[in-house]
Image: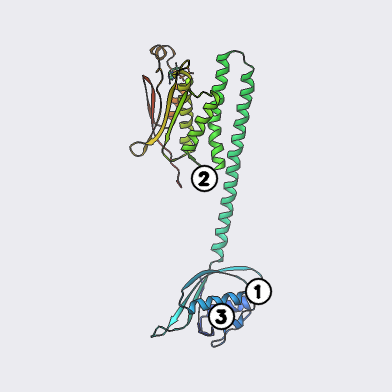
């Protein structure tokens, strides 16, 4: 790699230069430079001359300057130089002139720009994909809604609604990701809140109070989707079974770090609790089966306690985001 080195006095006349700088001045300005001649007299571009004047006057005031210099050669190709200039002092501390060295970094800058552009394109496509996945899931959900609304039987209709909710749970993730800066990390607080908001749309009742406490954390999609589906089932169950009739109550959802590297998610209600007969006869419905399947997918574990109210604690190792900010 060529290093260009030169030095000038207080009048910006050359006191020294190396062969590489001499070659460069020929290539960029068509100039045959000589020691003792003013550097600026070799430059032909007025705005570059102005910039150079300022540059040297800053150095003569004692400043050390590092910058990237952009320069067109005689063929019109743009080149980039890393430029370092510093003052030269005599023994009494007076500034006699300046020394400058530059390194051509054109290839590096061009590669950096290519990588940046490719990254921007990738981000754009990823954002677009999240948007389309969300739209497609929304279409599936609408189809189910139309189909479900033609069903007379309440039980079958509620099956449609539940399935629709599960699809919305996944769609909400892609919706959030498409809007966020970071396209692969799910900010869990807004996600879980949007899920719960979505559920309260379906069964809008104000006699049930929600307490949601989520540690600020971002999970990868692989963790966020199963967790979202579990929360969806558990909150749906609490809403559906814990407070029959006009009973009032509270549903609490928390997500917090447990002993490293585990996290704990708790969904709790202060309702009736799961009836003895339920646990024997109905055992698990589809909801609790989904919870179990998703816990397995996360290689986690869960406990379901029921007495006065119901409490489900899920413990799992989260897929955290590689770039958490
Ligand atoms: N939070 C809860 N409070 C009271 N009962 C519940 C609660 N969660 C679940 N159950 C009981 O457990 C059963 C199984 O739930 P689930 O597996 O989600 O199936 P499904 O909701 O389809 O019946 C429910 O039918 C209900 O009787
Ligand atoms: Mg259920």
Task: Work out whether 282 lies above or below 224.
Answer: above
Task: Work out whether 231 lies above or below 48.
Answer: above
Q: Residues within 10 Å of mark 3 (few under 14, many from 20)?
A: some
Please, what secondary structure does the residue beneath circle 2 have?
Answer: loop
Please, what secondary structure does the residue beneath circle 3 have?
Answer: helix
In the rendered image, the residue lying farthest to the bottom is 36
First of labels 2, 1 by sequence position: 1
Q: Is residue 61 among what the camera can see?
A: yes
Residue at figure coordinates x 58%, y 39% from the top left:
130
Drawn side of residue 140 relative to residue 252, left or right: right
Task: Check disc 3 and report the residue beneath it.
Answer: 22
Residue 211 x/y as whole percent: 43, 30
Q: Is residue 285 among what the camera can see?
A: no
Residue 32 x/y as whole percent: 60, 83
Counting every numbered tag in the picture gives: 3
Residue at figure coordinates x 57%, y 25% from the top left:
164
Drawn side of residue 147 relative to residue 258, left or right: right
Task: Check disc 2 and report the residue beneath it.
Answer: 182
Q: Residues within 10 Å of mark 2 (few under 14, many from 20)?
A: some
**Toward which corner of the image does residue 251 lie, by quadrant?**
top left
In the rendered image, the residue lying farthest to the right is 75
The label on residue 74 is: 1
């Amino acid at each position: 790699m060529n290093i260009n080195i030169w030095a000038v006095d207080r009048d910006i006349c050359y006191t020294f230069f190396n062969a590489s700088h001499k070659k460069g001045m020929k290539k960029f300005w068509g100039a045959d430079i000589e020691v003792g001649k003013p550097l600026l007299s070799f430059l032909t571009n007025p705005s570059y001359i102005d910039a150079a004047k300022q540059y040297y006057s800053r150095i003569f005031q004692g400043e050390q300057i590092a910058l990237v210099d952009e320069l067109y050669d005689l063929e019109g190709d743009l080149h980039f130089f890393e430029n370092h200039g510093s003052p030269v002092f005599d023994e009494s501390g007076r500034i006699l002139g300046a020394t400058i060295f530059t390194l051509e970094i054109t290839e590096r800058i061009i590669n950096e720009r290519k990588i940046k552009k490719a990254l921007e394109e990738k981000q754009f496509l990823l954002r677009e994909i999240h948007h389309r996945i969300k739209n497609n899931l929304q279409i599936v959900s609408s189809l189910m809604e139309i189909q479900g609304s033609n069903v007379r039987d309440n039980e079958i209709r509620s099956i449609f609604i539940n399935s629709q909710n599960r699809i919305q749970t996944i769609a909400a993730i892609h919706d959030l990701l498409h809007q966020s800066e970071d396209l692969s990390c799910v900010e869990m607080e807004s996600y879980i809140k949007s899920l719960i908001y979505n559920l309260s749309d379906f069964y809008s009742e104000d006699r049930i109070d929600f307490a949601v406490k989520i540690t600020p954390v971002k999970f990868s999609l692989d963790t966020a989707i199963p967790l979202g589906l579990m929360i969806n089932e558990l909150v749906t169950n609490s809403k559906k079974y814990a407070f029959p009739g006009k009973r009032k109550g509270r549903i609490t959802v928390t997500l917090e770090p447990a002993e490293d590297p585990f996290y704990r998610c708790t969904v709790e209600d202060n309702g009736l609790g799961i009836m003895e007969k339920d646990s024997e006869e109905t055992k698990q419905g589809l909801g609790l089966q989904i919870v179990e399947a998703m816990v397995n997918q996360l290689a986690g574990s869960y406990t379901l306690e029921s007495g006065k109210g119901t409490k489900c604690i899920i413990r799992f190792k989260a897929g955290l985001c590689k770039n958490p900010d």
